[in-house]
Image (cartoon, grey):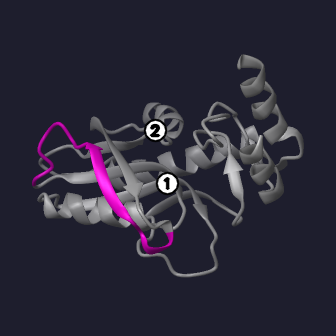
């Protein structure tokens, strides 16, 4: 069984095409941090912003961006899953909600990718419904779908093509979140992996 998973994981990358190098990835993280620092460095707000990492995809991005932020902040995470019809948004189920109150606070939501946008749109709506003063969405990557999304990110590290991308927190069948660069996997290779 171990050989099956090993072979499947490597087969998925065999024909993958580079989307962003490790250096470009780190530059994108730096751009996100710079924009957040510019916004919050000299803030006179009564309370520090609460940063929420969206698990599990944003764990790598969050771990890289947090040490670059030079303003006081609170940190927590959320875990949401989308069930149902992906094309129509489905239902967002909160597996982990913020452990502290968001009421009256500025919330920074860190996520790995803004894809269709349905999940982040519902996350923003829910946090505002819980009394957040403001919700700022900062994503490592925004996928260019060529159409309007239900939510826009306030801060974007880099824009990527409308391809299936892995690396830097984004996975394929649970593999390769740990890659330091981004790779696009073809639909044919994705299909072949499901048939194995």
Q: Is residue 72 visible?
A: no
Point out residue 98 in the picture as x, y percentages from the top left corner. Answer: 21, 42
In the image, is residue 69 part of the stretch drawn in magenta?
no
Q: Residue 139 shows which numbered tag?
A: 1
Q: Which numbered disc, 1 or 2, marks the residue closer to the eye?
A: 2
Point out residue 146 in the picture as x, y percentages from the top left corner. Answer: 64, 79
In the image, is residue 90 part of the stretch drawn in magenta?
yes
**Secondary structure under badge 2?**
loop
Q: Residue 49 shows which numbered tag?
A: none
Mark 1 → mark 2, Cα distance in angstroms: 14 Å
Left or right, 185 with reference to 26: right
What residue does disc 2 label? 56
Q: Is residue 137 visible?
A: yes
Q: Nearer the viewer, residue 108 or 36?
A: 108
Crowdedness near tag 2: few (<14), some (14–19) or many (≥20) residues, C-alpha within 10 Å: some
Point out residue 67 in the picture as x, y percentages from the top left corner. Answer: 45, 30
At x 77%, y 33%, the residue is: 8
* Image quarter of residue 169: top right
At x 62%, y 49%, the residue is: 28
Point out residue 5 in the picture as x, y percentages from the top left corner. Answer: 72, 27
Q: Is residue 192 above or below residue 119?
A: above
**Secondary structure under badge 1?**
strand
**Sequence order check, earlier mark of 1 and 2:** 2
Q: Residue furthest top?
A: 2
Image quarter hosting the C terminus: top right
Q: Residue furthest right?
A: 15
* Image quarter of residue 115: bottom right
Q: Which residues are magenta?
A: 87-103
Q: Nearer the viewer, residue 74 or 170?
A: 170
């Amino acid at each position: 069984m171990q050989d099956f998973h090993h072979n499947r994981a490597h087969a998925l990358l065999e024909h993958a095409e580079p989307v962003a190098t490790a250096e470009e990835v780190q530059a994108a993280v730096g751009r996100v941090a710079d924009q957040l620092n510019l916004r919050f460095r000299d803030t006179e707000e009564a309370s520090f912003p609460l940063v929420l990492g969206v698990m599990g995809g944003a764990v790598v991005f969050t771990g890289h961006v947090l040490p670059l932020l030079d303003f006081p902040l609170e940190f927590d995470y959320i875990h949401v899953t989308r069930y149902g019809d992906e094309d129509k948004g489905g239902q967002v189920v909160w597996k982990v909600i913020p452990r502290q109150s968001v009421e009256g606070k500025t919330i920074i939501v860190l996520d790995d990718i803004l894809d269709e946008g349905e999940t982040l749109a519902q996350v923003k709506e829910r946090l505002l419904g819980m009394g957040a003063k403001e919700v700022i969405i900062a994503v490592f990557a925004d996928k260019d779908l060529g159409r309007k999304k239900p939510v826009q990110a306030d801060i974007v590290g880099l824009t990527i093509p409308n391809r299936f991308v892995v690396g830097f927190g984004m996975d394929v069948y649970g593999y390769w979140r740990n890659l330091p660069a981004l790779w696009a996997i073809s639909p044919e290779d994705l299909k072949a992996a499901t048939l194995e």
